[in-house]
Amino acid sequence: MLRIFGLLFAFLLVGCFGDAPRTNPLDTDNPGSGYLLEGKVERFYSNDPLPGASIMIVPGSQIVVSDIQGNFTWSNRLERGQYQVIARGAFYDSDTQLVDLKKDTSLVFKLNALPQFEEVNLTSLHITSFIPPDEYQVEIGVLASDGDTQADIQTVYFEVPDLAVQDTLVRISNQQARFAGIFSRAQLNITFIEELQGIPFYLHAVDLAGGNSVSAAQYIYRVINTAPRPVSPDGSASLPINFTWQSLVLPFDFTYSIEIYPNSPISLPPVVTVNQIERTATTHTYSGNLPSGSYYWVLYIVDEVGNRSRSRQVELTIP
């Protein structure tokens, strides 16, 4: 009987006092145990905050997002141990830090903005020659951007894995990250331009920090084998100049373009360019200024995506 009363007294005593307080920091059930992990995400070249970045910890699955000031805090304290902390942002390169968590810790991540492709143009160019065979080339144009600065983009190149070909474009603008290149069949390891149809091209944009962005697959859409046929002028002409050519009917939408070049032993850019001449037209009058001299002009067929076919060169002399 005394033993039974003793057990009842013990149960009552436990009920009166409740659970023992868990203030021991080594007690994993202590709500105050573990360590605080917090930090800030900033832009690569400054201390400006980067909001909206995702921060993940490994091992673990919880993800937190940086606030408008770039700050983040893990809502639960973490046990002592080694962790990988990974910060990512949309259009930014990721950054990883290894942390041996032994105390409350604050981290700073500097994320590099990756180059983005604003425009990519991959087109074919057919150049009619006086003496066969005609020349065929591939023209590539890229307009890129970078969230850090336009000057951060260092290189743009293309690759064609199916042909084991890779080459670099040339920057053609200091104000914009605009790059371009013209490549022959020999440079592309092909005999006929039609071999490129259905084969993917990939553009790469590389910034100063080494961030490398790759475009979606790009394709040659069409090769225009038909050559435009200029008629006049062929020789001397006075201003305004009336250009004429033979009518063409093609199974796709197109326009004409005219370019006038100085007749020079070295390659020079056109001095006059006229674009978007209607496909039904067979004449165009140029009323602009053109100094006396020796020139030549060419006529282009241009389809809706920029594939082109160029006529033979035609003499043009302004007395």
Image: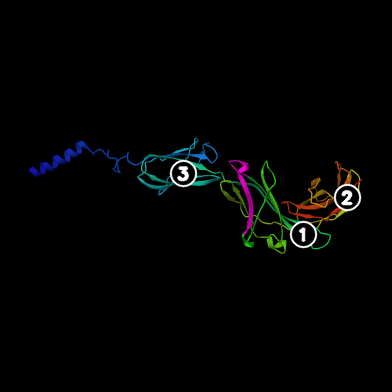
How many angstroms separate mark 2 from mark 1 (CA)? 23 Å
Mark 1: few/some/many CA within 10 Å (<14, 14-19, 20+): some
- Secondary structure under tag 1 reads strand
Residue at the outermost left position: 1
In the picture of the structure, the residue carrying the numbered disc 1 is 135
Judge from the rendering whether residue 226 lies leftward or rightward of residue 43; answer left or right.
Answer: right
Q: Which residues are magenta?
A: 145-160
Residue 290 location, quadrant: top right
Colouring method of the image: rainbow
Q: Amino acid at mark 2?
A: Leu
Judge from the rendering whether residue 306 lies leftward or rightward of residue 271; answer left or right.
Answer: left
Q: Residue 246's x, y, as percent?
A: 86, 54
Residue at the outermost bottom position: 191
Q: Residue 125's x, y, as percent?
A: 75, 55
In the picture of the structure, the residue carrying the numbered disc 3 is 55
Residue at the outermost top position: 69
Q: Residue 16's x, y, as percent?
A: 19, 36
Mark 3: few/some/many CA within 10 Å (<14, 14-19, 20+): many
- Secondary structure under tag 3 reads strand
Residue 94 vs residue 152, the one in the foreground: 152
Residue 189 vs residue 227, the one in the foreground: 189
In the picture of the structure, the residue carrying the numbered disc 2 is 316
How many angstroms separate mark 3 from mark 2 (CA)? 65 Å
Query: Are the two marked residues, 3 and 2, in contact with CB atoms closer than 8 angstroms?
Result: no
